[in-house]
Image: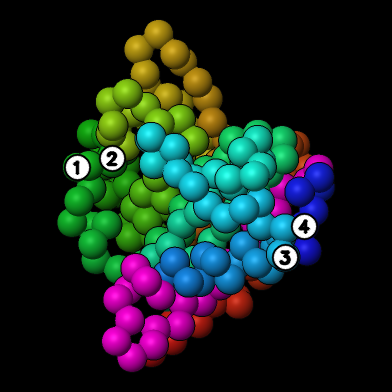
Amino acid sequence: MMSLEHTAPQIAVSSVSYRPGDRRLQAERRAVDSLLLGLLGEQRGGGLSYRACGAPYLTECPSLGISISHTEGGAVVLLSPQGDVGVDIERLGNQVERVSARYLTPREEQEVSAHPEAHLLRHLLWSSKEAAFKLVNPPSGSLLSFELATPLDELLEQRRCRLVSLQEGQPQSLRCHLLWNEHFALAALGALGEDFQLNKELLSTLSLGD
């Protein structure tokens, strides 16, 4: 359990249990609440509130960096006392394939399409840019505000990548940590410190459920 005064970032994932009559979003938010309880216990900072941009924060501890994400079958919470963070989890499927123009630049599309791991890479880039979007909240409102600056093979080998923010007048380089298995892709970035690593077994706790 993490103390609100803890100095190291913490990340936790959970499967989503869908009860009869549940709406998907309802079940996924319940999983997020359970993760917060597991990380912070009863001192959950007064619960979640949301800023005008949609970013979450803990009502009684607004300085604690927090990012949440949920997808069909999985949820994740990332906390950091060191500052703002972004996280995203995505179920591998066909939806990301259909909207590639929303998040891949022409150069990225060309390189990814030619790669034998194109399906996985599309999901990793989607999650990376979603996490970056949550962290930066670019004025453009577009995932195309970020461009990959890491060779694809290096990304897969190192399980990390670097995104460059394309915002005018605000050049920014973001280091993103990546994790995946046969069902999910996950990306985390922000104020995580030099020693932060994603445990390779993190996603093994997820089951697809019903």
> Is there a contact, CB below 8 Å, between mark 2 and mark 3?
no
The disc, 4 or 1, on the residue closer to the chain's N-terminal end is 4
Callouts 1 and 2 close, C-beta under 8 Å: yes
Q: Secondary structure at mark 1?
A: helix
Mark 4 sits on what residue? 2
Q: Residues within 10 Å of mark 1 (few under 14, many from 20)?
A: few
Q: Nearer the viewer, mark 1 or mark 3?
A: 3
| Residue 128: image location, x then y, percent | 45, 45
Q: In front: mark 2 or mark 4?
A: 4
Q: Residue 49 versus residue 93: which sits nearer the camera?
A: 49
Quarter holding residue 36: bottom right
- In the picture, the disc for residue 41 is 3
| Quarter residue 105 falls in | top left
Query: Which sits earlier in the primary sequence, circle 3 or circle 4?
Result: 4
Name the N-terminal-most of marks 2 and 4. 4
Q: CA distance from mark 1 to mark 3?
A: 41 Å
Q: Amino acid at mark 1?
A: Ala
**Magenta stretch: residue 207 in it?**
no
What's the mark number on residue 101?
A: 1
- Nearer-the-camera pick, 153 or 136: 136
The residue sitting at 70% across, 54% down in the picture is 10
Q: CA distance from mark 4 to mark 1?
A: 39 Å
Under mark 3, the amino acid is Gly
Residue span colored magenta: 7-27
**Residues at marks 1 and 3 touching, judged by CB atoms closer than 8 Å:** no
Judged left or right of residue 17, residue 158 is right
